Image (tube, coloured by chain):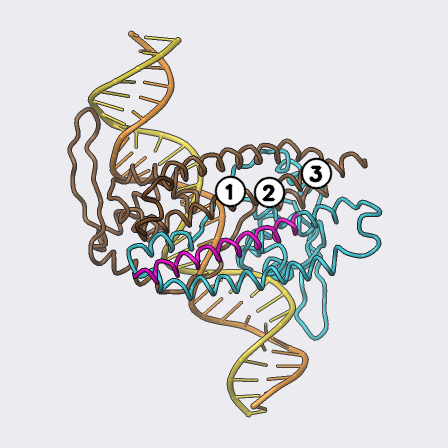
Chain colours: A cyan, B brown, C yellow, D orange
DNA sequence: CTTGTCTATGCAACGAGTTGCATAGAAGGA
DNA sequence: TCCTTCTATGCAACTCGTTGCATAGACAAG
């Protein structure tokens, strides 16, 4: 229900086409809110017909023309309203947690390689976040003049980093547990 | 796609009715995988017609009769198969992260009370987890005889605890950032 | 020269998830 | 007495999300 709002934020940060939004959702924003290009195109259509966003046809050479979207006044208002509404604790879906509890009824040791794969994925994502932090949030200007947008993007990124570190520590705990159960067997 | 599997795990841990499953999803399991009673009843129907689970009508006094479900052999097999399939890094939806980035285009200070509400919710959930851990995973037998199911439930619970602690630390960071931006204003 | 990848947009169909409503008896409080 | 809450199940309608497929030009590698 908040894909519209995620798109509004992304377009306020920088106008762009549906395709570009889809790429952003794959990279930065998608780590906190994911969406496929189909979803994005459909929602952009609706937002446009609701007057939340404006379109501009941008002709290009050597590639198809694109439609660049930017946020209109009603879209800004809709975002402001959403920001003032309370939201509920998000609904989580931890497949891995379900699998771990399920492993009690199968072979726990068989999960080890799966958990190791996840460990690797989180290691990669952490490295990606840290590289982004070094690139975008270090240097002399950082901290001198407080830019709200920059500060807020940084605190969200710090959240991503904290999440990945927590996950890695937990996955180590899970692996140790699985090895213990496998060995006692 | 894995609600079936979450239900299978829950029914293997303890058979029960749709209503009981819905309550479990509200409490323990729902912190890692949430579902409404409508979804559960619908999926139970499908699982029953697929032969994954068995039903038993249980008459009761002073309350409506219930249908107690338990896992049949094909259900166990389906779960085992799923456990051996790799799963992708779960898709996340952090509304709050979107709101925080969106606050750059509104009043950051207006988010403070919202973030404080989330802080409170996570404090409560952490307390709930810790109480559960004290209740179910302490005492003389804990650690002496390694029971796989118990150990695996405990490691999942430790994950929940680690998650809540990480969130609380991050929300403190977010609050400090919002206060800094509000004060500089 | 064909195959594959990248940009760019979109339809159609299906499956998953949400919301509102309905039933119905028992228990407990205002 | 009436109102609400709890147990227990379910239908209907709707929106959201996913998957498969299609188009189409440009470019690079084999």
Residue at 44 percent across and 56 percent down: it is A174
**Local secondary structure at mark 3:** helix
Would you name the residue on which mark 1 appears?
A90
Tell me, yes or no, if residue A95 can be seen here: yes
Name the subunit of mark 2. B
Residue at which label 2 appears:
B96
Q: Which residues are magenta?
A: A156-185
Answer left or right for B34 relative to B162: left
Rounded to the nearest angstrom, the CA distance separating label 3 from label 2 is 16 Å
Residue B162 relative to residue A71: left or right = left
> Disc 3 is attached to a residue of which chain?
B
Residue B83 visible at all: no
Q: Give the CA distance from mark 1 to mark 3.
A: 22 Å
- Viewer-nearest of discs 3 and 2: 3
Asked if both marks, 3 and 2, belong to the same chain, the answer given is yes
Q: Nearer the viewer, residue A19 or B152?
A: B152
* Mark 3 surroundings: few (<14), some (14-19) or many (≥20) residues within 10 A: some
Which chain does tag 1 point to? A
Pointer 3 residue: B176
Q: Position of residue B167 (x, y in %)?
A: 57, 43
């Amino acid at each position: 229900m908040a894909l519209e709002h995620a798109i509004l934020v992304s377009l306020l940060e920088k106008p762009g086409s549906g395709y570009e939004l889809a790429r952003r959702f794959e990279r930065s924003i998608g780590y906190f809110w994911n969406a496929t290009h189909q979803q994005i195109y459909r929602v952009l259509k609706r937002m446009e017909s609701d007057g939340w966003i404006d379109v501009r046809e941008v002709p290009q050479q050597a590639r198809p023309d694109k439609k660049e979207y930017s946020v209109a006044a009603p879209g800004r208002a809709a975002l402001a309203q959403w920001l003032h509404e309370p939201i509920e604790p998000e609904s989580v879906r931890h497949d891995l947690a379900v699998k771990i509890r399920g492993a009690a009824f199968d072979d726990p040791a068989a999960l080890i390689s799966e958990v190791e794969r996840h460990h690797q994925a989180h290691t990669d994502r952490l490295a990606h976040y840290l590289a982004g932090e070094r690139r975008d949030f270090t240097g002399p200007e950082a901290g001198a003049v407080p830019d709200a947008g920059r500060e807020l993007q940084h605190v969200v990124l710090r959240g991503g980093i904290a999440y990945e570190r927590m996950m890695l520590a937990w996955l180590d705990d899970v692996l140790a547990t699985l090895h213990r159960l496998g060995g006692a067997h």
